[in-house]
Amino acid sequence: MDQPERSGGAIEVVLAALAGVWIAAVTFGTQAVTWLVQQVLEVSGRPLPGWVWPAVGWFAAGLAGVPAVLLALLPRSPAVRAAGRAWLIAAIALGVLGSIRALPSQHHELYLGLLAFAAAGLAAGVVAVRRRGLRPLPAPGGAANPAGVPRPP
């Protein structure tokens, strides 16, 4: 008798939730600490160097990207792998959008314009990948779609 292939276990879902908490904590923590340092420096009359925000953004993207990549590649559950891909896209967006903060605060209109342009570009990239027919990654040691999840149109 054929048994349906498992689509993943509860441990995968728990690990995905923990990865989400880690990613949110890393994002909040790095941004909050950098903002606090910026405020202290400004009170003392020294500006934060322009390279700090992009460095912090990409550092946080790296810390967030590691569990996201693991979630996107290792679990058997297509839903958990999809969550990993979504977190990976968010980590990339963190680095890209954080880099724009290198602009000095005097140029706030330019900053907002570049931020909107970059966010629109990231969104267009996600839509383009979806339209190309992104297929679920193969499960470790198995079929490409073990749970029978419908493929995106």
Image (tube, rainbow, N blue to C red):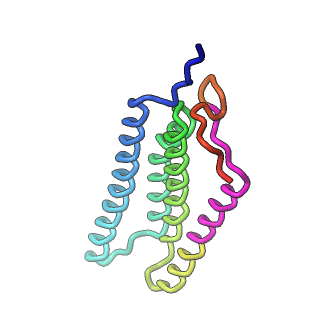
**Rendered position, 108 above or below 57:** below
Q: Magenta residues, as a range?
A: 118-138
Residue name at image x 26 percent, y 75 percent: 44
Q: Position of residue 118 (x, y in %)?
A: 59, 70
Q: Is residue 138 left or right of residue 7?
A: right
Query: Residue most toward the front?
Result: 1
Query: Residue most toward the right?
Result: 132
Q: In the rendered view of the protein, which quadrant contains the C terminus?
A: bottom right
Q: Position of residue 134 (x, y in %)?
A: 68, 48
Query: Residue most toward the top?
Result: 1
Residue name at image x 65 percent, y 45 percent: 151
**Rendered position, 74 above or below 60:** above
Magenta segment's dominant SS is: helix
Q: Position of residue 146 (x, y in %)?
A: 60, 31
Residue 132 occupies quadrant:
bottom right
Residue name at image x 36 percent, y 40 percent: 18
Q: Nearer the viewer, residue 141 or 45?
A: 141
**Rendered position, 26 above or below 41:** above
Q: In the rendered view of the protein, which quadrant contains the N terminus?
A: top right
